[in-house]
Amino acid sequence: MAITDELLVDAKDRMAKSVESSRGELATVRTGRASPHLLDRIVVDYYGSQTPLKQLANVSASDARLLTVQPFDKSAIGAIEKSIIESDVGLSPSNDGAVIRLAIPEMTEERRREMVKVVNGVAEEGRISIRNVRRDVMSDLRELKNEGEVGEDDERRAETSLQKQTDEAIAEIDTLLKGKEAEILEV
């Protein structure tokens, strides 16, 4: 395999990771509908160690407006509740000693617009990450050409292929963004 091909494969992998990272970030943004992913970023102080909520409890969406958090260890319910209150999720937990319930309030028009700005920011971070990968690989290609390890034609072919990969990855992020925006603005 030619050195340019190795660079392109590496670039494709790194771009795919950026897209996946953006997909994960977008999934944690609140849309007015209950989704267990809303609590993915919450970390609980469990016996002195910071533990992700999903390792301590079963999180499920029992209906469109209600999340339920069922701790595996009932004694952790207070710590879980405290972590949810202190997080940026903006939900008020209520518990009955065994299960924590989180009612998802209806989003106002203003809040929807704010959330659209948030998801646009997340998507832009993903695009920037992809463009950084392209910049690094382009720099590597120029270096190889200057050192005489790659001919000008090979460099041009690799740059064209790299640009195509970049455009595809950015298009994928834009598609994710459009879907998330539609989900947020849906009343």
Image (cartoon, rainbow, N blue to C red):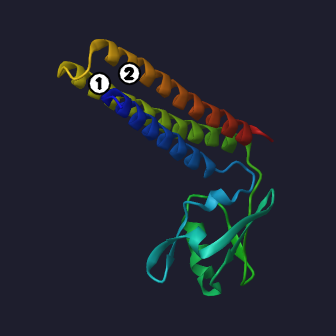
Q: Hey, what amino acid is under mark 2?
A: Ala
Farthest-out residue, bottom: 75
The disc at residue 158 is 2
Q: Residue furthest top?
A: 153
Element at label 2: helix
**In the rendered image, which quarter is residue 142 located in?**
top left
Q: Looking at the image, which residue sits at the far left? A: 147
What x and y, as percent, mark residue 119? 59, 40
Toward which corner of the image does residue 14 lie, by quadrant? top left
Number of numbered markers: 2
136 to 94, vertically: above or below: above
Q: Say above or below: 95 vs 64.
A: below
Residue 47 vertical position relative to residue 169 in the rendered view, above or below: below
x and y percentages locating residue 149 in the rendered image: 22, 23
Q: Is residue 168 left or right of residue 50?
A: right
Circle 1 residues within 10 Å: few <14, some 14–19, many ≥20: many
Q: What residue sits right under mark 1 in the picture?
A: 141
Query: As drawn, is 17 to the left or to the right of 142?
Result: right
Return the x and y of residue 183 as percentages of the image width and height: 73, 41
Amino acid of disc 1: Leu
Q: Residue at x 79, y 58 (%)?
A: 65
